[in-house]
Amino acid sequence: MNDTRVRLDKWLWAARFYKTRALAAEEADRGRVSVNGLTAKPARELHVGDRVALRQGGIERTVDVLVLGTVRGPAPVAQTLYRETPESIAARERAAEARRLQPEPAAAIEQGRPTKRDRRKLADWNRWSASLDDTGS
């Protein structure tokens, strides 16, 4: 499990931050992953003690590399590869609390979805009327 050379994208995949190695490489290419404060490419070599900052969806995470793993294992094993910083944990918890306290978007709808009859009333045209002027030619 301790290799001397590990690519960033492979480690992010093994640590279960991203579902596929290709996704990890894509995120690094887009500049969403940095190592020790510098934007990193997918092929960058990681070392024990490096600080990796990444974004998963809308969540910012900062972790310290503890072990250089290249094999994707179960989640409990993957979590031993890194230690999340206390600031990162606090920020994630604040973001989760803010999401929890936001109002439900569906609660703003007072009347609900229009019925079939309501939708017919909303239509600007009368689909059942046929003009006598139309000869069909």
Image: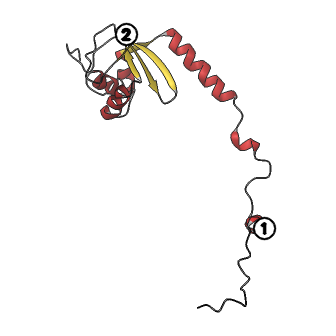
Along the line of sight, the residue nearer the viewer: 31 or 19: 31
Residue 78: which numbered mark, if any?
Answer: none
Q: How is the image coloured?
A: secondary structure
Q: Within the image, what quadrant is residue 82 found in?
A: top left
Left or right: 113 in relation to 29: right
Residue 133: x and y in percent read 71, 90
The residue that mark 1 highlights is 121
Q: Secondary structure at mark 1?
A: helix
Of pointers 2 and 1, the one earlier in the residue sequence: 2
Q: Is label 2 in a helix, a strand or a loop?
A: loop
Whole-Å distance between the Cαs marked 2 and 1?
Answer: 61 Å
Q: Amino acid at mark 2?
A: Asn
- Is residue 89 positioned above or below 111 on the image? above
Q: Nearer the viewer, residue 121 or 131?
A: 131
State left or right for residue 60 relative to residue 44. right
Task: Give amino acid for label 1.
Answer: Lys
Please tell me in which quadrant of the rendered image residue 14 appears: top left
Residue beneath the point at 33% across and 7% down: 49
**What is the tally of numbered marks visible in this picture?**
2
The location of residue 30, given as percent across then percent down, is: 38, 28
Q: Which quarter of the picture shows residue 35?
A: top left
Q: Which residue is mark 2?
A: 36
Depicted 83 relative to depicted 130: above or below: above
Residue occupying the far left of the picture? 4
Q: Position of residue 44 (x, y in %)?
A: 27, 18
Residue 47: x percent and y percent?
A: 28, 10
Circle 2 residues within 10 Å: few <14, some 14–19, many ≥20: few
Mark 1 crowd level (few <14, some 14–19, many ≥20, 10 Å Cα): few
Residue, x 65% and y 24% (percent of image)? 98
- Residue lying at 52% horizontally and 28% vertically, measured from the top left: 58
Question: Relative to 85, does residue 118 appear above or below in the rendering?
Answer: below
Image-based side of 125 in relation to 72, left or right:
right
